[in-house]
Structure formats: C-alpha cells, structure tokens
C-alpha cells in the first residue's frame, strides 16, 4: 500500500506521476474536501489510467468514478447543524458526544466498470444501495 498525499491543487500532477511510477493496481480516494473539490481530475486520471478506484464520497460514483462507499454528506451536515444549534444555545462543545455516521452507502457505476473492463460480481451488485447504469 502506498499513500499519495495531496494538500494543494498544485500537488496533483506530482501525485499522479507517483501513482504511475509505483504501478499501483487500484486507488482508494478518501472523502477529503480537497479531493472532493478536484474529483473530476482524479476520476479522469483513474479512468484514463485504467485504475479501479473506490471513493469516500457518494457523488464521485455519479461523476464517473467506479465505486463509492460513503456516508451521506447531506445527513452529516444536518447533524452538524444540530451541534451548532446546541452550542449557540449555550452547550459546551466539550460536553457534546462524538457521533459517527450510522448509514454507509455503496454506489457502483456499471458504465465505468464496463469502460475499465471490470465485471462486478452479482453478490456485490445485490448489496449496492445504488447502481448507476
């Protein structure tokens, strides 16, 4: 396993070059804000390089990524708003419990799978919350 960190837009070319040089077999793209902001170029690179990739943001599969396994961002933002409300009403942030997403969704893009020459097993398709055809 190799980690290719990107903190600024200017670092994508270097990261893509490193991915190519390391001859990786697949990518795991985390649900980081900078990666989400640049998802189009990441998806284009992965697909052009024939690299299967799984993304940490559901919207990436809809944008052409192969697979996304992620919690729903909208529900996370709603939960964050309830925390803001509690803090504005006087709650101490340190006293609020830490929450984790309770629903993780699997989205599979069959169009991308076909373009990459990948057959998704029926058992995985059956478990998917959404299949994009």
Image (cartoon, rainbow, N blue to C red):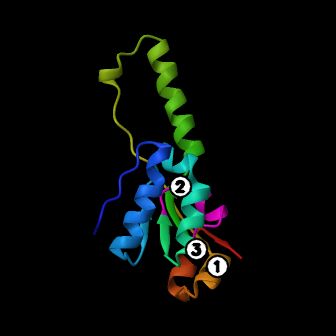
Q: Which residue is mark 2?
A: 57
Residue indicated by mark 1? 110
Q: Of label 1 and label 3, which has the lower sequence position?
A: 3
Residue beneath label 3, please? 48
Q: Height in image: 115 above or below 6? A: below
Circle 3: element type = helix
Chain-order first, disc 1 or disc 2? 2
Residue at 48% from the left image edge and 67% from the top image edge: 54
Location of residue 67 with respect to 41 vertically, above or below: below
Residues at marks 1 and 3 touching, judged by CB atoms closer than 8 Å = no
Does the segment drawn in magenta span residue 110? Answer: no
Dot in front, 3 or 2: 3
Q: Determine if residue 29 is in view.
A: no
Number of other residues with Cα within 10 Å of mark 2, as a class: few under 14, some 14 to 19, many 20 or more: many
User: Is residue 60 within the magenta segment?
Assistant: yes
Residue 24: % across, % down: 37, 75
| Sequence order check, earlier mark of 3 and 2 | 3
Dividing the picture into quarters, in which one does residue 94 lie? Answer: top left
Q: Is residue 39 left or right of residue 103?
A: right
Residue, x 58% and y 74% (percent of image)? Answer: 48
């Amino acid at each position: 396993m190799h980690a290719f960190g990107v903190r600024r837009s200017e670092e994508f070319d270097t990261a893509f070059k490193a991915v190519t040089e390391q001859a990786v077999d697949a990518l795991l793209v985390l649900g980081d804000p900078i990666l989400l902001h640049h998802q189009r170029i990441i998806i284009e690179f992965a697909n052009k390089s024939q690299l299967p990739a799984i993304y940490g943001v559901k919207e990436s599969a809809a944008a052409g990524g192969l697979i996304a396994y992620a919690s729903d961002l909208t529900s996370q933002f709603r939960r964050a708003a309830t925390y803001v409300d509690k803090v504005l009403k006087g709650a101490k942030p340190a006293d609020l419990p830490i929450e984790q997403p309770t629903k993780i969704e699997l989205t599979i893009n069959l169009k991308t799978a076909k373009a990459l020459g990948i057959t998704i097993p029926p058992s995985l398709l059956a478990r998917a919350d959404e299949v994009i055809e």
